[in-house]
Amino acid sequence: MAGIQVSSSLLLSKSLPSLRCRREIVGARVNAPRVHLGVVSHPKLPIRYLVDETETRNGYSIARHDTKSSDDPRVIAKLYAIMEAVADRVEMHKNIGEQRDNWNRLLLTSINAMTLSGATMAGLAALAAEGSPLMALKLSSIVLYVAATGLLLVMNKIQPSQLAEEQRNAARLFKQLRVQIETTLALGKLDINDVNEAMEKVLALAKAYPLPLLGSMLEKFPSKVEPARWWPKQRSKQGFVGKIEGNNGWTRKLEEEMRQVVRVLKQKDLAEYIDLGSKALKLNKMLAISGPLLTILGALGSSFVGTTDCSWPVMMGVVAGAVATAVNSLEHGGQVGMVFEMYRGNAGFFKLIEENIMSNINEKDVERRENGEILEMKVALQLGRSLSELKQLAAIAECSEEFASKLF
């Protein structure tokens, strides 16, 4: 018992210094001087659906924009809502464009396979003996030709290659509109007019390149070729007759240069692509009529095989099928409808540049125009030229045969 008491006393004596040290440390912590930091203001977090930098919707990240505190939050919210809708439309047009491009390839392959099979059976029917083999081959050939004719009529009506090109253009233009909205948000000084302008552009694009086929599909064989229009109409304004030297980047010389550029665009580039579009349309009409006509002739020739000793039925049944396959491959394999839409879109591109320039020149208040130097730079880039080349084009516009655009 005495040993146990001695050991316990030794343990207590060893632990007392450590306990005293801990008490001193705790006391020092408790009695430490308090530092007054004052009022701490936490930064206000932006609204999630406005500027969430990490969130990605429909494959596009919503970037952060430094908008000024004077901008109306409701205007900012509306612009972001429009931008999200535009991003969704980009994906919709992209997916539908791929789908309609698949239509073109699959329908063309199926129609050509049926047409060649019908021609082959018509030739075999001429070699078959009378009776069931002859009748089976004749009926098979007629059925295949008739089915090919029906599918070809539908294909020529909707022009899948042209539909795919429309959707590709729509996806590209909606992406461009999204970038324009982002630029507007980044520059600040927003008002309700920016929202209205963005809405008008979205609606104009939706009208120019509709998604559904039934009811709102664009006419594939119009009576008159006109440039594609995907922007809202601009109101005509009276010209400015006062002094403009040095106002918002505009001078009399710059105005005259821009007028000369517009003159070249109208007389050369726009007229050239309208003419090319007319030629492509005429070729497409001829091919669209010839294909079904040839398959019908093939069906008629197959129906008369074995009924006469003459060779014209089998000649008609086989040759018409072969020529129909070549015609269909040229029309849809060569994507003549897509070429027509491409020419029409290029003409619309030049028309947009023309209207943009003239709307600025005709604006009465120079300060409300787009800055002249910036507009000149934009036009030069859109036409694939440098600023010096654009000035040179305006200087020799009346005596030169050169086109305004160097891009296409």
Image (cartoon, rainbow, N blue to C red):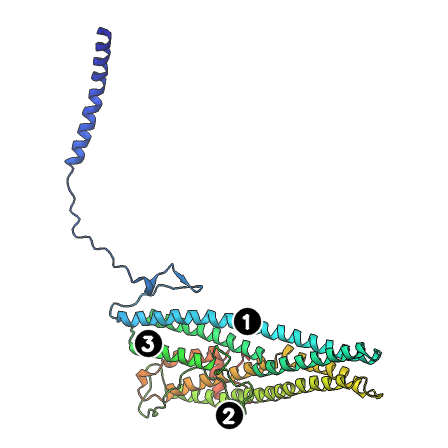
Left or right of residue 329: residue 86: left
Name which quarter of the figure residue 136 lies in: bottom right
Q: Quadrant of the N terminus?
A: top left
* Mark 2 or 1: the one toward you: 1
Secondary structure type for disc 3: helix
Three-letter amino acid code at the position of disc 1 = Gln
Q: Position of residue 274 (x, y in %)?
A: 54, 88
Mark 2 lies on residue: 398
Point out residue 107 in the picture as x, y percentages from the top left corner. 62, 75
Disc 1 target residue: 99
* Cα gap from disc 2 to disc 1, whole angstroms: 47 Å
- Looking at the image, the residue that sits furthest to the top is 2
Label 1 vs 3, first from the N-terminus = 1
Q: Secondary structure at mark 2?
A: loop
90 to 228, vertically: above or below: above
The residue beneath circle 3 is 195
